Amino acid sequence: MEKEFYFKHDKTTITISDEMLKIKRKGLSKKITHGLSGEKEININNITSVQVKKPTIFTKGYIQLAYTGSPETKNGILAAGLDENSVLFVHKDQEKIDEIKSYINSIIYRKKDNSSTNNLSVADEIKKLKELLDQDVLTQDEFDAKKTELLEL
């Protein structure tokens, strides 16, 4: 899946694929504040959080992406405008921002679920298998085979 979101007011495009999030900025002011290429790629699996500040009548909003090792801007809209991991947006773009945030958060939560599942100890796994054996869901042979596999005997 690849989806592109264009923010006309800020001349910025966010493209999301299964592996990468790309931020591409156009315009001279963007080249000055965000480097000559105006592009940023972030591995989507490395994103740890998404912060959204909604726009008001007087100010733009912003979406900020954080990942391990990235600086986090904490000085509001002015700092976000210079931050390479943030994109400014206006009120009419709120729906796009919500979709981006939702998609990234689903990846973050899925990652957390997988890591907590993988962190079960061998003893916990054997205990679960024993419960299944006691409930006659597993046979003794199935239980023994899986236990041996878990204990790497």
Image: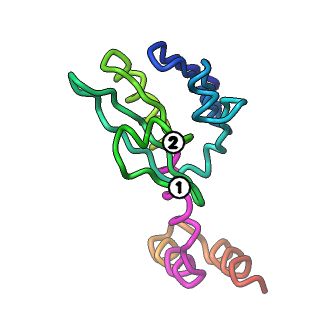
Give the residue at x 58% y 27%: 30
Tag 2's secondary structure? loop
The residue under label 2 is 83
Task: Kindly report the secondary structure that dominates the magenta region of the rendered protein.
Answer: helix
- Check disc 1 and report its element: helix, strand or loop: loop
The residue that label 1 is drawn on is: 71
Residue plotted at (40% across, 24% down)? 89
**Nearer to us in this view, 31 or 6:** 31
Q: CA distance from mark 1 to mark 2?
A: 9 Å
Q: State the image coordinates of residue 105 (x, y, percent, origin top left).
A: 45, 43
Q: Which mark is residue 54?
A: none
Residue located at (58% from left, 59% from top)? 68
Residue appearing at x 23%, y 24% in the figure: 58
Classify residue 40 by image quadrant.
Answer: top right
Q: Say how the picture is coloured.
A: rainbow
**Up/down of 60 relative to 6, above or below:** below
Q: Is residue 121 above or below residue 136?
A: below
Q: Is residue 33 magenta?
A: no
- Percent position of residue 79, x then y: 42, 43
Tag 1: residue type? Pro
- From the top left corner, tell me how far across and down residue 56 is, in percent: 23, 27
Q: Is the residue marked by circle 2 packed among few (<14), some (14-19), or many (20+) residues within 10 Å?
A: some
State which tag comes first along the sequence, 1 or 2: 1
User: Does residue 37 lie above or below 125 as drawn?
Assistant: above
Q: Amino acid at mark 2?
A: Asp
Viewer-side residue, 100 vs 23: 23
**115 horizontally vs 22: left or right:** left
Asked whether 117 falls inside the magenta stretch, the response is yes
Label 1 CA crowd tier, 10 Å (few <14, some 14–19, many 20+): few
Q: Which residues are magenta?
A: 106-129
The reply to whether discs 1 and 2 touch (Cβ–Cβ < 8 Å) is yes
Which sits in the foreground, 56 or 107? 56
